[in-house]
Amino acid sequence: MATPLLRAAARLSLCVVTAIACPLVATSAAADGRHDLVVPRDHPTIQAAVDAADAGDRIAVRPGVYREQVVIDKDVSIVGSGDRSTTILAPRTLTPGVGGSTSIVEIHNGATVSLSRLAVSGPGSGTCEKGALGSGIRVLEGARLDLGHAAVTHIADTPAAPCFRSANAVRIGEPRTSTGSATIRHTEITGYQGAGVVVLNAGSTATIEHSTVTGHRELSTNGIEFVAGSAGRVTHSTISDNECREPDPGCGPDFFNEVQHAGILADSPGTVVRHNRIVGNQVGVSVAGGGVDISHNNIRRNSYVGIALQDGSFTVRKDRIEGGVHGVAVVPKAVDTHAVLDGVRIGRTSGAPVQTFACCGFTATAAVER
């Protein structure tokens, strides 16, 4: 660990090089031995500060645009000056991280990291074919992210295009190989090319609270995905504008032969979706496998279906659904499927408020309780 004298000397060197006047005082140290590092006062880049930090240190980042990738493998907190003042911007050339994927911020090696009061922004300068931007923020290898009062924006390639599994705003875990976890609060996630938040692998979790997830206006996107055995909570958030858009010939309203894009998508039990505003998606909430808690959501103007329930037993409570073709669709693809709609209010649909399907030797039923 660098001594206070060496840290002060480093700041003196930076002041001489950049012709910025700054005081010769040692980096502050808390009573518990934690240090506070300041970018660019103590280190010219966020990555340099991370490299110099000890576990538990706090890195304060002054206003500015920092065009760099940041790789974090230790417990630190990084605090900007506000998500409209401090921005980590994708560099023109991205260096692949763990497993060959690219991201603007990568958190791995079991680190617990807090990011707050800053923005992580693209676009990347690559294309689908070469140098594509994989994620805005990537969390894997058992790492944990606490993201608060932040923004993750413009996570797309140049030009923005529908690349498979490319340009997700926040990616947590990896299929079959790695887990991660995150808490996302009071954060704006917009302009992503793939999905807003993707959680992958059994053991990976995410909690999204009081946040906004808004899809790309020109590309097919999903808002929040809990897939490959992962689970989590989405509460008091707004998820909007995730639909099939051209070019995407596989999209359509047929649940058995076409693809639908959703505000929230989950394929395993244990996920909670409560007290959200879910607006202007193709499907508001699409879940499979049963055991998902859906309640007290305001679900409006989702063009196909407000809630799609597939393959399992479900209870939906106190949701308000308006618009679209159906309020609730109950879809069996691999098992008989049953839904209980407890106090769910459905209105202004162009088709049946509750639609059950039959396929492949399986049936669907729905019980409506007032």
Image (cartoon, helix red, strand yellow):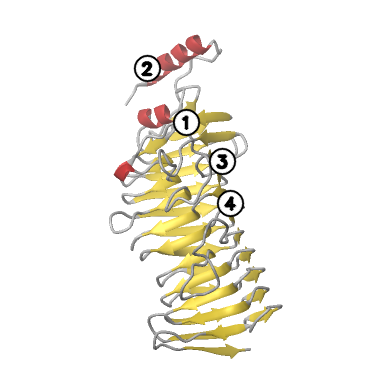
**Distance of label 4 from label 1 (alpha carbons):** 29 Å
Which residue is under mark 1?
Answer: 92
**Distance of label 1 from label 3 (alpha carbons):** 24 Å
Which residue is under mark 2?
Answer: 6
In terms of secondary structure, where does tag 3 sit? loop
At a point 63% along the width and 84% down the height, the residue shown is: 352
At a point 56% along the width and 53% down the height, the residue shown is: 219
Q: Amino acid at mark 3?
A: Arg
Q: How many callouts does the rendering have? A: 4
**Neighbours of disc 2 within 10 Å: few (<14), some (14-19), many (20+):** few
Find residue 295 and report its horizontal and vertical position in percent. Answer: 57, 74
Foreground residue among 334 and 251: 251
Q: Amino acid at mark 4?
A: His
Q: Amino acid at mark 2?
A: Leu
Which circle, 2 or 1, is nearer the viewer? 1
- When the figure is inspected, residue 275 is found, relative to residue 93, above or below; the finding is below
Residue contact between numbered discs 1 and 3, judged by CB atoms under 8 Å: no
**Distance of label 2 from label 3 (alpha carbons):** 29 Å
**Neighbours of disc 1 within 10 Å: few (<14), some (14-19), many (20+):** some
Residue contact between numbered discs 4 and 1, judged by CB atoms under 8 Å: no
Which label sits on residue 117? 3
**Distance of label 2 from label 1 (alpha carbons):** 33 Å
**Neighbours of disc 4 within 10 Å: few (<14), some (14-19), many (20+):** some
In terms of secondary structure, where does tag 1 sit? loop
Which circle, 1 or 3, is nearer the viewer? 1
- For marks 1 and 3, the one nearer the N-term is 1
Which circle, 2 or 3, is nearer the viewer? 3
